[in-house]
Image (cartoon, rainbow, N blue to C red):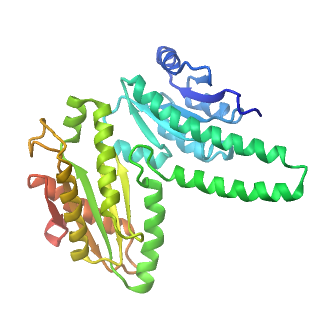
């Protein structure tokens, strides 16, 4: 394998005209575009190619994009291939969650903007080329056992970096949903064992759809990046984790932290975001970008599940939005009812 070889990218859509248009957008001497007209055909192709990226249409007959992505994750050769969903479906939370649960790393909404498409493709192409280069170096050094051992260590290090990158949201630089799920599972068990509190802060950008619709998706992406930086600064303790939960939602997991501590973090986040003073002329809440936050927490027990606390935080967030947004709400039994 030569590092100058073209990178294979799979595009999947049941409509030929969509494939032709997408192929034209992706035209690049570094890329070899492979087309599939159905989920079944795509699954056959992943057994033949070492794809750098899959661009997968969500709405297809017989087998839709969600099912296709889930099956790709079950195939050893395509298990770690990044999948970006192409969809005309609205960016509602339920659609985004279903996509991420199926194995997608990102979404592109139709009509696709060429600059956004190529920006995302370049990120995954660079990761693929790094991995390919590492593999080439390993093959060249097989003659010497000592050198091979050295390369093995470097490979382990590089794979660790790549694995870490696959757990990071490419736009905001925050941990992604998969990373969040792994973290919560570990910390939940620890909190149960030690009888220590665990708190969650659910965060939603107010009127973000109106921001995207009126300022454009590129401005929306830049807004998400700025908020991502604010959230990184707000997580002052290394043991805590703030992740992109999906779309314009984020979630903070605060280890060994009670509700009062979670309120302090939530206020810090609101204060830092307010200081950014990002204009939002299409918000009915304020003339700048604001956020709503929902807090829940407590000491977990063996009978409870992490999802229960997250659901509570989500209900508190819903209450904050219901009562006018741009505020913090704490889960109580009243909200539960």
Q: Is residue 63 visible?
A: no
Estimate the x, y position of residue 202 in percent, counting from the top left. 27, 59
Q: Is 282 left, or right, of 113 in this rendering?
A: left
Q: Is 5 left, or right, of 170 in this rendering?
A: right
Residue at 36% x, 53% y is 245
Quadrant (top left, top right, bottom left, bottom right) of the C terminus? bottom left
Residue at 33% x, 51% y is 228
Estimate the x, y position of residue 267 in percent, counting from the top left. 19, 64
Along the line of sight, which residue is nearer the eye, 141 or 67? 141
Residue at 88% x, 57% y is 145
Give residue 154's quadrant in the image: bottom right
Q: Is residue 232 visible?
A: yes
Residue at 64% x, 37% y is 129
Estimate the x, y position of residue 90 in percent, counting from the top left. 30, 34
Estimate the x, y position of residue 208 in percent, counting from the top left. 22, 41
Quadrant (top left, top right, bottom left, bottom right) of the N terminus? top right
Q: Is residue 235 above or below residue 245?
A: below
């Amino acid at each position: 394998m030569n590092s100058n070889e073209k990178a294979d990218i799979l595009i999947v859509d049941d409509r030929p005209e969509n494939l032709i248009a997408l192929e034209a957008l992706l035209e690049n001497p570094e890329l070899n575009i492979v087309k599939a007209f159905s989920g079944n055909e795509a699954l056959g192709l992943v057994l033949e190619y070492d794809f750098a990226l899959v661009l997968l249409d969500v709405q297809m007959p017989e087998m839709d994009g969600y099912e296709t992505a889930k099956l790709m994750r079950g195939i050893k050769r395509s298990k770690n291939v990044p999948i970006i969903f192409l969809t005309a479906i609205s960016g509602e939370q339920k659609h985004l969650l279903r996509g991420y649960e199926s194995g997608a790393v990102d979404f592109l909404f139709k009509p696709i903007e060429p600059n956004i498409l190529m920006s995302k493709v370049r990120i995954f192409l660079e990761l693929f080329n790094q991995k390919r280069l590492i593999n080439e170096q390993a093959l060249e050094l097989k003659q010497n056992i000592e050198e091979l051992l050295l390369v093995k260590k470097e490979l382990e290090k590089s794979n660790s970096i790549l694995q870490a990158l696959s757990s990071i949201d490419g736009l905001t630089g925050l941990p992604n949903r998969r990373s969040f799920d792994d973290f919560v599972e570990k910390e939940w068990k620890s909190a149960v064992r030690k009888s220590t509190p665990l708190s969650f802060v659910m965060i939603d950008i107010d009127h973000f759809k109106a921001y995207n619709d009126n300022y454009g998706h590129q401005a929306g992406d830049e807004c998400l990046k700025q908020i991502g930086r604010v959230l990184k600064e707000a997580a002052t303790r290394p043991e805590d984790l703030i992740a992109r939960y999906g779309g314009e939602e984020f979630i903070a997991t605060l280890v060994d932290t009670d509700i009062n501590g979670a309120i302090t973090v939530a206020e810090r986040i609101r204060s830092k975001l307010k200081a950014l003073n990002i204009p939002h002329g299409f918000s009915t809440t304020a003339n700048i970008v604001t956020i709503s936050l929902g807090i829940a927490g407590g000491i977990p027990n063996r009978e409870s599940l992490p999802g229960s606390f997250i659901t509570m935080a989500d209900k508190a967030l819903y209450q904050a939005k219901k009562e006018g947004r741009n505020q913090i709400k704490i889960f109580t039994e009243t909200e539960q009812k």
